[in-house]
Image (cartoon, rainbow, N blue to C red):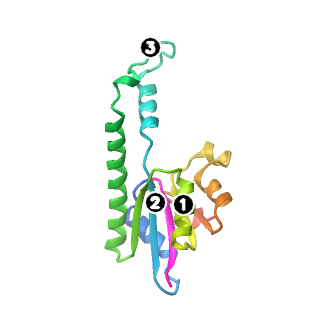
Amino acid sequence: MSYDVVLLIEQALTRADAERVWSLHQSVEGPVRYHVLIPMEDAAARVESAMGNLGGGDLMGAPAMQASEVDFDAVRNEARDYAQQELDDTLEHFKALEIEATGEIVIDPPIDRLKTKLEEVDGREAIILTRSHVVAEFFHVDWTSKARRKIGVPVLHLLEHENFDEQAH
């Protein structure tokens, strides 16, 4: 029987990240399998953010770009391609280390998909690897806080590019 771990990541893991994740499970008897989830950025949110940035400081002026001018399909395809590249890069690092890993791009709310993936693979733990999101963490609406409320397995939150020992909660 394998020990399945579901990783929810915000961006591609580096080779060093993959090694650190693996180091957490080296003492596990039997095979360890990783299932990587990477959310696809919402196209509408990207466009809204870009439109806000293009508007500059003139809050009362007309928007710099009209929503009707935006090719949402192109933005969605670009977001999907970007997420796929991030996922492919991550899986390549695991493969180079001879670590079994599969992955998928997530379109659903990330924590919902994390929960269902854990159920699908009979996952033993979840690891969430993100950048620091101070406001979301303060109000406990970050991925880790939501996951701890929603799923019934240990959740480890790691901040990218920091010492894992300092971040384990």
Q: Residue at 67%, 46% (x, y): give it.
A: 138
Asked if residue 100 shows in the view, the reply is: yes
Mark toward the start of the polypeptide (3 vs 2) = 2
Say which element carries label 2. strand
Dominant secondary structure (helix, strand or loop) of the stretch shown in magenta: strand
The residue tagged 3 is 62
The residue tagged 1 is 114
The residue tagged 2 is 37
- Residue lying farthest bottom? 29
Mark toward the start of the polypeptide (2 vs 1) = 2
Task: Please identify the quarter of the rendering in which residue 99 is found.
Answer: bottom left
**Residue range highlighted in magenta:** 1-10
> Amino acid type of disc 1?
Leu
> Amino acid type of disc 2?
Leu
- Measure the alpha-carbon separation of dots 2 and 1: 7 Å
- The reply to whether the magenta stretch includes residue 7 is yes
Where 33 falls versus 149 (above or below)? Answer: below
> Amino acid type of disc 3?
Ala
Q: Residue at 39%, 75% (x, y): give it.
A: 100
- Measure the alpha-carbon separation of dots 3 and 1: 40 Å
Query: Which mark is drawn over residue 129?
Result: none
Pick the front one: 160 or 81: 81
